[in-house]
Amino acid sequence: MPPERESFSTFADALGHRFALPYQLLFRRKRMKLRLLLAGLLALMTSLAHANDLSEWKPLLPVTELHKLLEDDPFAATVVDIRALDSKDPEASYNTGHIPGAVSSPYATWRGQPDNPGKFLTQDKLTWLVQAIGADIDTPVVVVHRGDSYSNFGAAARVYWSLKTAGLTQLAILNGGFQAWKQAGLPTSTELETPLPSDFPATIQPNWLAQATEMEAQINKPEVQLLDARPDDFFEGFSWHPAASKPGTIAGAVAFDNERWFRSGGPLLESPERLQNLVQENKLGQAEITVSFCNTGHWAATNWFVLSEIAGKQNVKLYPESLVEWSTANLPMDNVPNRLQWAWISTKQWLVSKFN
């Protein structure tokens, strides 16, 4: 039996039914286009808001801000853990716990050989390191150090400086490092992250890089400040790095121990206001050019970071090879002990190493 046909009381009803379906389809299509338009506008607004956030990107990031950033978007930043991949000390090991999503890039891979640990990397090596962590110009990079002493910060600052010198611009250091993250009770992971390599080509920016030949020509010039970041006993010639040929400091240098930037010698930097006060009180970064150095460009990276990235001083450079290279090259130095002093200091250090 054939299905019943729909009956209409009038011709107008029949005509209305005939054209109702196309109009309904047309209305649905318009409504779908409107939804797509609204979704596109929302995505654009989100993108603009994200871009605005990045325009206010801070070089020193508290753990609470990094946690919120990653909670909102796990891919908002490339988090780079520079602790050893594996270590007998679990606190120093990436494998025993790290920030979720963080990639491993041990500090040792950013350094030179034992005879010149601070040696600046070649452009090819920098490119390889940057691409290996998946870093690119569009995504911020946050460097995470161990965080158990002020000296750890120097490692993060050196990697930060290397990334900036390679051409990256959106960079930050996690204040307090991984220990601050753990102490805040934030989640950790033991999963090994394998980042998708980027195609970013490192191009060395000379703005923040000082080299020995350049520095030798600037010794004792009033427009240049040579800033020694080491503790006073190094500056005064009573201690020295094992790879350095002799104690002392670069001729004409002034001392500012990098530990002074930190709260009670711990891993947390002082507040930005306190840091600015220290800069002003000690007349740092006021010269036309300031060059920060230490033994191997580690502690010096902290002085460079505070002056350049926090205080906003222009023309602040890091001498990466520092005193190890300078002393070995027999370039001009101050506070070098005479023979009698040298014999006494050497004997004292030998006794300390034997009986300490």
Image (cartoon, grey):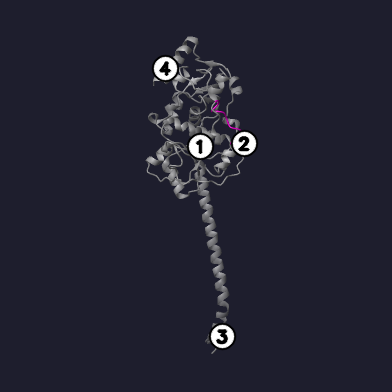
User: Would you name the residue on which mark 4 appears?
Assistant: 351
Task: Please say if the residues under marks 3 and 4 sit with CB atoms less than 8 Å apart.
Answer: no
Q: Earlier in the sequence, mark 2 or mark 4?
A: 2
Any part of residue 56 in sight: no
**Is disc 2 placed on a helix, strand or loop?**
helix
Name the residue tied to disc 3.
11
Q: Residue flagged by tag 2: what amino acid is it?
A: Asp
Q: CA distance from mark 2 to mark 4?
A: 44 Å
Question: In the rendered view, would you say 168 is above or below 253?
Answer: below
Which amino acid does the dot numbered 1 rest on? Answer: Pro
Q: State the CA–CA distance, disc 2 to disc 1.
A: 18 Å
Which secondary structure dominates the residues rendered in magenta?
Answer: loop
| Type of amino acid at the residue the image marks with label 4 | Leu
Which sits earlier in the primary sequence, circle 3 or circle 4?
A: 3
Whichever of labels 3 and 2 marks the residue nearer the N terminus, that label is 3
- Please identify, in this view, whether the residue under mark 3 or under mark 4 is nearer the observer: 4
Asked whether 219 or 231 is in front, the reply is 231
Which region shows up in magenta? 115-125
Q: Which is more foreground, mark 3 or mark 1?
A: 1
**Residue 180 is at least partly visible in this image:** yes
Q: What secondary structure is marked by label 1?
A: loop
Binning the other alpha carbons within 10 Å of mark 4 as few (below 14), some (14 to 19) or many (20 upward) gives few
Which label's residue is closer to the chain start, 3 or 1?
Answer: 3
Tag 3 secondary structure: helix
Report which residue position mark 1 lands on. 106
Which quarter of the rendering shows the N terminus? bottom right
* Residue 284 counted in the magenta span: no
Q: Secondary structure at mark 4?
A: helix
**Residue 124: assigned label:** 2
